[in-house]
């Protein structure tokens, strides 16, 4: 069963992934798994950074502590899938999608504004990951990996919701929604302009 409520939330993305991506990605699963492993590492690091920067925000600390633990468990699971297939963790790759998206986190100004942008950019990365995990779940020929990506799809949908809710907890909800719409448009433009690659999760 698909997580219908959360799936509808994820559909706020302005652009669907090019259908060619899942075809070429499934034929190059070693590189996809390596890139995916580093995505999970970076997601955990982002959560830790937010906890360190905003330790006075109790709900943020509590929710991101759980999120970090979950992201790290995902890293461990991806590493296991790599090794089961006779592969090792390769070198990290530059994630141009994330790099470009993070340039839209506004610097300076109110501390809460930067927190809002960071939480919303993190939410969009989770949303895009969820959308790609759904494609892998539905179309990858390996049944074991298909089940794996279904489980991660559900998890990433929850992370998307958590990040947006945290932004609305600490910032004006109307401002959060307006900024989310701006960033959704930007995210769609980034995806449009990036090449379809067989060795990247994003």
Image: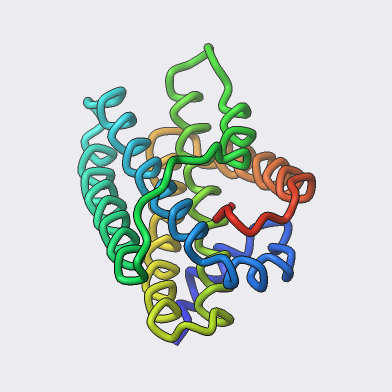
**Residue 4, relative to residue 105: is it above or below?**
below
Q: Is 96 above or below relative to 152?
A: above
Camera-nearest residue between 17 and 160: 17
For residue 51, side relative to residue 131 (left or right): left
Question: Residue 188: where, in percent of width, then height?
Answer: 72, 49
Left or right for 87, reference 31: left
Of residue 174 and residue 145, the one placed in the foreground of this image is: 145
Quarter occupied by residue 128: bottom right
Residue 60, compared with residue 142, is above or below; it is above
User: Can you say which quadrant of the picture contains the N terminus?
Assistant: bottom left
Query: Residue 28's spot in the image, x, y percent?
Result: 57, 65
Residue shown at the point (36%, 70%) measured from the top left: 85
Residue 53, percent across and down? 30, 23
> Percent position (x, y) of residue 131?
57, 65
Instruction: Name the colouring of the figure.
Output: rainbow
Q: Residue at x 48, y 16 (%)?
A: 110
Q: What residue sits 75% from the left and 50% below the top? A: 195
Q: Decide which of 28, 16 is in the foreground and name it.
A: 28
Q: How many marks?
A: 0
* Occupied quadrant, residue 58: top left
Q: Is residue 67 left or right of residue 200?
A: left
**Point 68% across, 65% down: residue:** 21
Q: Nearer the viewer, residue 8 or 197?
A: 197
> Residue placed farthest to the front in the image?
86
The quadrant in which residue 101 appears is top right
């Amino acid at each position: 069963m698909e997580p219908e409520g959360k799936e509808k939330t994820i559909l706020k993305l302005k652009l669907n992934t090019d259908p060619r991506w899942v075809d070429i990605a499934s034929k190059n699963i070693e590189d996809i798994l390596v890139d995916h492993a580093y995505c999970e590492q970076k997601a955990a690091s982002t959560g830790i950074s937010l906890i360190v920067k905003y330790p006075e925000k109790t709900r943020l600390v509590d929710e991101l502590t759980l999120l970090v633990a979950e992201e790290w468990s995902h890293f461990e699971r991806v590493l296991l899938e790599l090794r089961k297939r006779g592969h090792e963790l390769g070198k990290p790759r530059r994630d141009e999608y994330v790099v470009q998206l993070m340039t839209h986190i506004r610097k300076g100004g109110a501390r809460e504004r930067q927190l809002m942008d960071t939480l919303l950019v993190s939410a969009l990365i989770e949303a895009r990951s969820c959308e790609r995990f759904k494609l892998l779940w539905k179309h990858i020929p390996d049944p074991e990996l298909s089940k794996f990506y279904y489980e991660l799809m559900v998890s990433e949908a929850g992370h998307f919701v958590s990040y947006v809710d945290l932004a609305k907890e600490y910032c004006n909800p109307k401002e959060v929604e307006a900024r989310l719409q701006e960033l959704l448009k930007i995210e769609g433009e980034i995806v449009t302009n990036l090449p379809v690659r067989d060795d990247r999760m994003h």
